[in-house]
Image: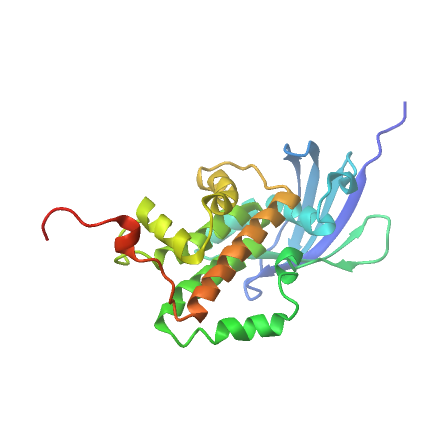
Amino acid sequence: MGQKKLFKYEFRGLIHPLLVKFNWGPVVSPFSFPELGMTGKVGFEVHDGEVLAHLESPQDPKEFNLIFMGCLGEIVKLGIYPYLDAFGYANGLAFSVELTQAKEANSGDWKWLPVQVPVLRERTKSPDDKFREICDLYDSPKAWYLQKALSDLRSAIASASDTGLFCYRAVETLASFFKETPHEKLTNDTWELFRKSIHASRDEINVIKRYADISRHGSVTRIPTEKRAEVFAATGNIIDKFVMLAKRGYDGRASPIEKLGPKTGTD
């Protein structure tokens, strides 16, 4: 009986910040993607901040409906980060891995890894117009909520494994605009006021929350590619609805009294 075929891929990239020269490896460790039934090994070494890594698996990744090299790169980074995080903790620094290129082991052609989330890019015919539309809102002090939500979205784009967590945090940030005071918690009434004001449904938000809870409660379950796209689509819808509210000068915000009912008791 012949030896089972292994599918092999190679990666290269950088450790940031570049000024700190991290050196480690070679290291080889097993990985498991239980949601897809995919297993294998990840190996890497780092010399003066430059990464060389490889992934091998007895399953053909092309059969798993992955955003191909980009998703494999996330698996490779999950093999590198435990060592990088330990080095960062020991030195009081935050490091990140940027895998820039990949290729099949038997191919001589290095390909640039995708960095774009297509489902967000495809939401508009003109990214330049969308960019200017948002920047025009930044003159208002109320724009902080939108700016912070987009910051959370940036983290969601950068981290496939924590997409749900950061996308939901973006939604929580926008919902916080509707709190009576900055220090109060997000109550059910605040959430209802948020949903009514931007015309979003509870189900729309729960699409995102479902995958946020996975990370928030310490699970290492990874989000499948098609579900990640679903989460980004739902988050983009909510951000765009908030942008529309902001473009109206936040006119159309539901009345707290109307929404929450009359106050009882004495002041």
User: In this rendering, would 104 be left or right of 196?
Assistant: right
**With respect to residue 112, does 62 lie above or below?**
above
Q: Which of 1 and 114 is in front in this view?
A: 114
Residue 76 in view, yes or no? yes
Residue at 77 percent of width and 35 percent of height: 59
Which residue lies at the image location 84% right of the left edge and 34% below the top edge?
A: 5
Q: Which colour scheme is used?
A: rainbow
Answer left or right for 190 relative to 202: left
Image position, residue 82 (x, y; %)? 55, 44
Quadrant containing the N terminus is top right
**Figure check: 239 above or below 131:** above
Q: Where is residue 232 in the image (x, y as percent from the top left)?
A: 57, 52
Q: Most extreme residue toward the top, as rendered?
A: 1
Residue 141 x %, y %: 35, 72
- Which residue extends farthest right? 1
Query: How far across and how far down the image is residue 39, in percent?
Result: 70, 34
Q: In the image, what residue occupies the spot 90% across and 26% down?
A: 2
